[in-house]
Amino acid sequence: MTDPYKSVPIRSSEITPRHVYLSRRDFMKAAGLATGAALLTACAPSAADLPGNTKPVPVSNATDELGDPVNSYGDITSYNNYYEFTTDKQQVSKEARSFTTTPWTVEVGGLVNKPKTFGIEDLLKDFTQEERIYRLRCVEAWSMVIPWEGFTLASLLKAVEPTSDAKYVRFETIYRPEEMPGQKSPFYEWPYQEGLRLDEAMNDLTLLATGLYGEPNVPQNGAPLRLVVPWKYGFKSIKSIVKIELVAEQPATLWNDIAPNEYGFYANVNPDVDHPRWSQASERRIGELNRRPSLLFNGYGEQVAGLYVDLDLTSNY
Ligand SMILES: Nc1nc2c(c(=O)[nH]1)N[C@H]1C(S)=C(S)[C@@H](COP(=O)(O)O)O[C@H]1N2
Ligand SMILES: [Mo]
């Protein structure tokens, strides 16, 4: 058996399997202590507080490879960016609650030898699921640490066999305005679309996430399937994907179309390149009081700096 964490900067000792989250929760319950939900930042309603949600909230004391603790399940599922629902981060979970995620298919095609439309069940069954703790850094200068489950985008792309003409990967979110009120806004060009260079897409860090904290993805986090590219600003990590296309030219992206001077195609986390309206030098980790310095490539430089040796990171922001 091959080690799934071989080229990932996370030691398997730092991966907390589901039973550990659950046993810690059970421990806290047994000890009569407050559960994670009660420890949340005062302003953020937790998923458990939402009417109709009686599921216990998993708790973890896992950390990422820099020693940063993972954010609570409540924070991760109640402070979100998902413009198809609302631009209010604390209302996304509520607006997205009745979003339908079954049945779900993902069409993978374009410049490939074996185009295929996958049912979400096939993706869960046929591709090796792993857990990886990643930092997510939003371009709005907040960040979280999230224990994702999913499989590498590389494993899916290899299965469809990209041709030698394929140079980029284009992703598309579902278009369903009857369930996604934000898609009625004429200000954005729906559906949400994103893109990666093929070598970025094939990098072992690039994950298609199917869940977090041992639970299947909830709508606000991009259920059932969303991209996670941990060295780039959060907007690259497109949610609720229905289409993946191998293409020859650099694809258009929603944010780059709206404001090319603010949102580049690369969007690598870079403390030295400011957003035109604010600094990118520091960030606010959700749940912490003091800002912390931001890291080049969000701290994943060892794994990805080699992709950009020929690229000027200031003009290619
Ligand atoms: N389809 C879609 N995907 C999206 C977004 C969005 O508005 N629509 N927001 C992006 C942004 S800006 C961020 S920071 C992350 C947030 O992911 P999270 O809510 O799971 O933390 O999702 C990204 N993916
Ligand atoms: Mo973001």
Image (spheres, grey):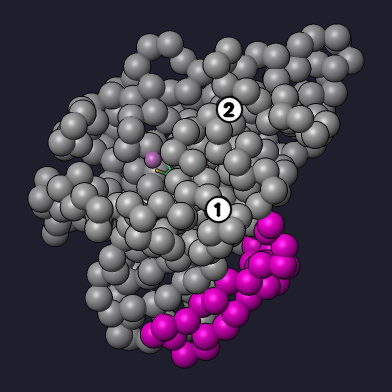
- Identified by mark 1, the residue type is Met
**What number is the disc on residue 75?**
2
- Mark 2, residues whose alpha carbon is within 10 Å: few (<14), some, or many (≥20)? many
Point out the stretch of residues depicted in magenta. 100-129
- Identified by mark 2, the residue type is Asp
Q: Residue at x 41, y 83 (%)?
A: 110
Total residue callouts: 2
- Mark 1, residues whose alpha carbon is within 10 Å: few (<14), some, or many (≥20)? some
Quick check: can you spot residue 31?
yes
Q: Are marks 2 and 1 in contact (CB under 8 Å)?
A: no
Provide residue 72's location: percent of width, then percent of height: 62, 26
Residue 206 to residue 57: above or below: below
SS at circle 2: helix
**What number is the disc on residue 180?**
1
Q: Which image quadrant for residue 208?
A: bottom right
> Of residues 175 and 28, which is closer to you in this image?
175
Q: Which image quadrant for residue 150?
A: bottom right
